[in-house]
Image (tube, rainbow, N blue to C red):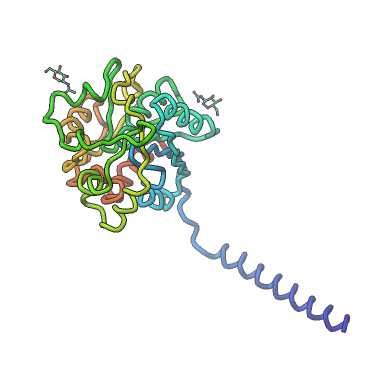
Amino acid sequence: MARFSNSLLLVFFVTLLTTTLFTVIDAANKPKPKPSKKVNIVLVHGALADGSSWSRVIPRLHAAGHHVVAVQQPLTSIEDDVAKVKVALRTIKSGPIVLVGHSFGGVVITQAAHNNPNVSALVYVAAFAPDQGESVAELGKNYTALPSNQAFVPDSDGHLLLPQNLFLRYFAPDVDKKEAEIMAVVQGSFDSVRFGFVSGPPAWKKHPSYYIVAEDDQIIQPELQAFFTKRIQAKKTVKVHASHALLVSRPKEVADLILDAAKAVAK
Ligand SMILES: *[C@@H]1O[C@H](CO)[C@@H](O)[C@H](O)[C@H]1NC(C)=O
Ligand SMILES: *[C@@H]1O[C@H](CO)[C@@H](O)[C@H](O)[C@H]1NC(C)=O
C-alpha cells in the first residue's frame, strides 16, 4: 500500500515538473509585450460616490500596464479627504504619479498635489479646479444655478446626499438604470461645509493638467468646467456629451485622457 502511494506521488511530481517546464518554454516562445513605461495613477472620487465609481476606468489603465490606486475618501471634510490622498501619494515609492479627481475630488487634488514634486500631472474629470481663495459655493455664481443644487438633503448627521430618485435624474441619467440605482444606494454622504472650503495655492499652477468636460452635467455647470479648462491651461481638453457620472457612462474617453497624461509623463 505504501509502495503504491509512493509511485503515485512520483507520477504526480513528474507530471508537475513536465507541466511547469512546458509552461516555462511556452512563455519563452511567446512574443514579449513591449515593455510599458509604468506610471502610478491615483484616482480620487467625489462626493456622493466611492472608489468603485472608477470600476470601468481601472481595467483600461491596467491594460496599459499602469499601477492604479483608488483612494477611498471619508467625505467628512476637504481636509480629511486631502489627508487621505496625501497618504496614498506618500505610499508610492517610485515612478511618476498622475493624480486624477472627479467632481469635488478636483478640489482635493488641487490641494493635495501642491508642492509635491512626485506628482507629474493632474487630470480633472468634470471636476472643480479652484484658485487660491475661491470656494465651490462662489465658483458657480457666474452661471445659471442648477436645480440639483437645491436637491441635497441632510442625513441624521447633517451630511448631505441626494434622494435616490433625484440621484438618478441629476447625477447619473445616462448610466444603465440598474447600475445607477446601485450607485444611488451606495452614494457617500458628505459634509455641507465643503461648499465654503477656501482653496489654498492650487497645484494646477505648477503641474501639467488635463480636463474632460461633461457637457450634459447637471451637478457642475458645463460652462464652469469650460472656464476651468482655460484657466488651468489644460494640455488637453476633451468634451463629451455625458452626465456628471461620465466615468461610468463614458469610461473609454475618461481612461484615454488619463492614458494621454500617463504617456506624457512616462517619457
Ligand atoms: C516623494 O517621494 C520620495 C520618495 O518616495 C519621498 O521620500 C518624499 O517624501 C515624497 N514627497 C512627498 C511630498 O510626498
Ligand atoms: C466670474 O465673473 C467675474 C467677473 O466677470 C470674473 O472675474 C471671474 O473670473 C468669473 N469667475 C468664474 C468662475 O467664471
Point out the residue furthest to the right here: 2
Q: Residue at x 82, y 80 (%)?
A: 7
In what quadrant does ligand 2 lie?
top left
- How far across and how far down the image is residue 129, in percent? 28, 27
Q: Residue at x 26, y 51 (%)?
A: 249
Q: Nearer the viewer, residue 160 or 39?
A: 160
Q: State the image quarter where residue 71 is shown.
A: top left
Name above or below for residue 104 compared with residue 248. Answer: above
Q: Residue at x 30, y 53 (%)?
A: 181
The quadrant of the image that shows the C terminus is top left
- How far across and how far down the image is residue 80, in percent? 44, 27
Name above or below for residue 113 compared with residue 127. Answer: above
Q: Nearer the viewer, residue 255 or 168?
A: 168
Q: State the image quarter where residue 41 is shown.
A: top left
- How far across and how far down the image is residue 101, in percent? 35, 35
Q: Nearer the viewer, residue 124 or 118?
A: 124
- How far across and how far down the image is residue 178, in percent? 29, 58
| 110 to the left or right of 2 | left
Name above or below for residue 107 compared with residue 236. Answer: above
